[in-house]
Image: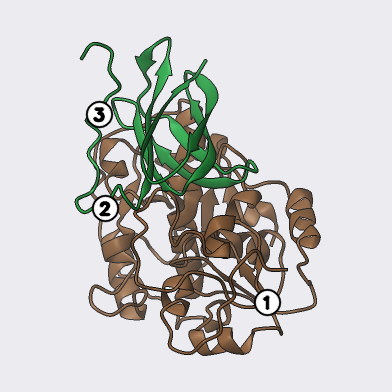
Chain colours: A brown, B green
Amino acid sequence: MSRQDVLVTADWAEKNLGTEGIVFLEVDEDTTAYDGGHLPGAIKVNWTTELQDPVRRDIVNKEQFEQLLSAKGVGNDDAVVLYGGNNNWFAAYAYWQFKLYGHRDVKLLDGGRKKWELDGRPLTSDVTEPTATSYTAQEPDNSIRAFRDEVVEAIGGKNLIDVRSPDEFSGKILAPAHLPQEQSQRPGHIPSAINIPWSKAANEDGTFKSDDELKKLYDDAGYNENLSTIAYCRIGERSSHTWVVLHELLGYDDVKNYDGSWTEYGSLIGVPIELGTGR
Amino acid sequence: MCGAPDQAVALPPGTDLTKETVLTGRVLADGQPVAGAFVRLLDGTGEFTAEVVASASGNFRFFAAPGTWTLRALSRSGNGETVVSADGPGLHQAEVAVA
């Protein structure tokens, strides 16, 4: 993969708004952000109700993904451009799911909503009504998804990358600082994990850092290119951002996103937990 | 109002200010609120911790922990930052001027 296969620039996006065969999808942590203004022609995806099963704790299954994309008017051959607020956290989470279900052409808008807004590019509150399609997804590619048992087995053997903030990693706080802190699970991190906050991979305007800067970031933090990798955060969205960096931009093999992340791991009975700043 | 700080920022029900350390404030340009600014919370080492979008009235809020924090705002009106020291749980207020 090269950067051009993964990212589009804001300039490119603005020139290609409304182009046949290109679908812009907005995925925000704040699910009301779209309603106040979005890229002209973009269609809203609600991560809380449309990218997760409504009952079980899981991402949508293949059939649900097919129904979602069909309803959003995405064809199998369409180029999909995902973007969102909060430095593309949830757009990256959606990107990972699009890859999991085998969509051929999906990219992220580099910088997401933030760069778009800071640049003063056009936004509209006009809602685009998609024309339904009949989308066919692939079976899930679990080579990019980690589950809890393999995470426990990976302790001391694989790169475990904890991408939360240093205070979440050490156990000082349980959730990002824009969220209330009352949680049921135990604080801390998975033993042997190294803390490389997702934010270090992004510039202040939300764009990804250069490949050279990214490679140096992970090298300096002790990332071993010869080992398999599992990235995690609190609920799997920030680690999707890092998964995009490691697997898509830097092209490392065998990188998985652990979407269960700390809200699952920190609630498991009997698994080891490490406190403090780690190694 | 008499220039008193805006106390009207609603906290989620159940927020216990004897336990939670809440940082609130406003983004201002020439004394006027800046809507939609991107407000970043940086910890004592300058490390990014969180980011929110300021409300229509320029207000923002973080749930943090006691310590020294930098609030940095990015906006179409410019950027700016301010340091706030939270000595313990409770509501801590700050204004961030951008230019």
| Disc 1 chain ID | A
- Rendered location of residue A43, percent (x, y): 32, 49
The picture places residue A260, in percent across and down from the top left corner, at 44, 76
For the residues labelled 2 and 1, the Cα–Cα distance comes to 46 Å
Q: Nearer the viewer, mark 1 or mark 3?
A: 3
Q: Is residue A77 above or below residue A33?
A: below
The picture places residue A254, in percent across and down from the top left corner, at: 67, 78
Do marks 2 and 3 share a subunit? no
> Can residue A22 be seen?
yes
Q: How many numbered circles are shown?
A: 3
Identify the residue shown where x is 38% and y is 63%: A75
Q: Does residue B40 appear to the left or right of B35 in the view shown?
A: right
Q: Identify the subunit bearing mark 3.
A: B
Q: Secondary structure at mark 3?
A: loop
Residue topped by disc 1:
A192
Which residue bears the numbered disc 3?
Answer: B7
How would you rate the neighbour count of disc 3 (Cα within 10 Å): few for under 14, some for 14-19, many for 20 or more?
few
